[in-house]
Image (cartoon, rainbow, N blue to C red):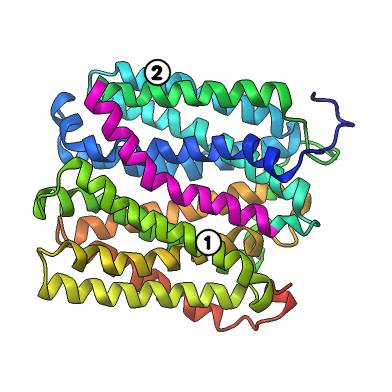
């Protein structure tokens, strides 16, 4: 089913069944092994900072790798990039299950992230190919966002269960098997959706999105939102399991409540965005990040040992994250449909590098095992995005339907 004449004729339900596994598995690569990080560090004879680096490397490569695969997907098509990326992820996951040294583990995490980045480019470029001019577009972004928000809730719980029964290495075998199922389904059912190729492969297209103020604004919003979550899941195991003495299972349950809030918020935002416009949602999201950060500061100062003092503000931050992620792709990629793969790549790459680099720097510069890294990141990035958004008026040009 890879004829150039074939169009995407699937229902919304079938579309989600085909697209969502690649996004979910890519996200599980970050979240699933969070509860067993301390035991992994001991088994690999690695320091906590080295294991932390595997999270950062995954996220940065997840974005940076798309600078290569984005233009390739515009030139060669979404389908081959998706299948090659899926197989790369699969093989790297098997290798991670067998790794015995920190260096090998880090190298394989890099390869796993490269495969995940190819899958993300192909998925979001396909969504843009198929739904850019259809009313279902905002719906599918919202649904994909809702499902992705559930991954942090289910991933750590699944990882804890797998590790308890089979050991932490089995987590990566589960990821490999899941990706195998997704790749087989795509091989059988995923048609090519890229527009007819024109001209030769050009890397200059990577600079085209950077000329758009809207692209920068919504990419910064995405970085503010997802970066807040990146810092959260980076420090949360140490705050809740080391300082507040939660078990791995208790940590997974509490951690998952933030994802549940994000899922509910994404569904509400999906209905609101067509009424008030993307720029209004973006500003509201940044406001939630700032308010949540202030509450985190209060909790860190007054009730440091309280789980609710830490997780309660994260619920408000979760609403802000959901708002930013829900409106980010449509806002950033508007007007770039002719290079959807490349624009998607630059969006995720720039966002990933910003949130990974700035987030890691803040983690290193602020007190360890505390809420300070999250609070500082939220306030800094949300304030920058909110300030820039004041130059964009609500209306059709800012994404109001």
Q: Is residue 186 magenta?
A: no
Query: What residue range appears in magenta?
Result: 138-165
Q: Is residue 160 magenta?
A: yes
Between discs 2 and 1, the one toward the N terminus: 2
Please report the residue visible at 26 percent of the width from the left and 53 percent of the height from the top: 254
Give the residue at mark 1. 266
Give the residue at mark 2. 94
Above or below residue 166? Residue 41 is: below
The nearer-to-camera label among 2 and 1 is 1
Q: Magenta residues: mostly which secondary structure?
A: helix
Please report the residue visible at 13 percent of the width from the left and 29 percent of the height from the top: 42
Q: Position of residue 165 (x, y in %)?
A: 25, 22
The answer to which quarter of the image holds residue 169 is top left
From where the camera sits, is residue 276 visible?
A: yes
**Left or right: where does residue 244 sit relative to residue 172?**
left
- Asked which secondary structure carries label 1, the reply is helix
- Asked which secondary structure carries label 2, the reply is helix
**Left or right: where does residue 303 sit relative to residue 87?**
left
The answer to which quarter of the image holds residue 272 is bottom right
Q: Position of residue 246 (x, y in %)?
A: 14, 49
Residue at the top extreme, as displayed: 98
Q: Nearer the viewer, residue 261 or 191?
A: 261
């Amino acid at each position: 089913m890879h004829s150039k004449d074939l169009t995407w004729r699937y229902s919304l339900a079938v579309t989600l069944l085909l697209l969502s596994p690649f996004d979910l598995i890519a996200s599980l690569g970050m979240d699933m092994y969070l509860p067993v990080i301390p035991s992994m560090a001991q088994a690999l004879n690695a320091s906590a900072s080295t294991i932390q680096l595997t999270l950062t490397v995954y996220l940065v490569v997840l974005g940076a790798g798309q600078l290569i695969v984005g233009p390739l997907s515009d030139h060669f098509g979404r389908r081959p990039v998706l299948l090659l990326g899926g197989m790369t992820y699969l093989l790297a996951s098997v290798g991670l299950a067998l790794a015995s040294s920190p260096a090998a583990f880090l190298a394989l995490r890099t390869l796993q992230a490269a495969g995940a980045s190819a899958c993300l480019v192909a998925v979001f470029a396909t969504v843009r190919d198929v739904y850019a001019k259809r009313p279902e577009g905002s719906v599918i972004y919202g649904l994909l966002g809702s499902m992705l928000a559930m991954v942090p809730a289910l991933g750590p719980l699944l990882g804890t269960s797998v590790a308890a029964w089979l050991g932490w290495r089995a987590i990566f075998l589960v990821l490999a098997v899941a990706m195998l199922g997704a790749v087989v389904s795509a091989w059988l059912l995923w048609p090519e959706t890229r527009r007819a190729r024109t001209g030769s492969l050009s890397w200059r297209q990577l600079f085209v999105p950077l000329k758009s103020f809207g692209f920068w604004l919504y990419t910064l919003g995405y970085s503010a939102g997802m970066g807040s979550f990146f810092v959260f899941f980076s420090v949360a195991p140490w705050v809740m399991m080391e300082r507040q003495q939660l078990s791995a299972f208790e940590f997974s349950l509490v951690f998952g409540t933030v994802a549940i809030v994000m899922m509910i918020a994404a569904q509400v935002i999906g209905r609101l965005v067509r009424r008030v416009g993307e720029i209004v949602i973006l500003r509201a999201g940044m406001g939630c990040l700032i308010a949540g950060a202030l509450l985190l500061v209060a909790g860190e100062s007054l009730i440091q040992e309280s789980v609710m003092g830490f997780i309660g503000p994260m619920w408000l931050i979760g609403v802000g994250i959901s708002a930013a992620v829900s409106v980010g792709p449509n806002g950033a990629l508007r007007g770039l449909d002719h290079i959807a793969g490349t624009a998607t790549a630059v969006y995720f790459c720039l966002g990933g590098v910003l949130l990974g680099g700035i987030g890691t720097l803040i983690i290193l510069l602020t007190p360890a095992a505390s809420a300070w890294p999250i609070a500082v990141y939220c306030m800094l990035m949300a304030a920058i995005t909110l300030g820039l958004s004041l130059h964009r008026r609500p209306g059709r040009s800012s994404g109001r339907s």
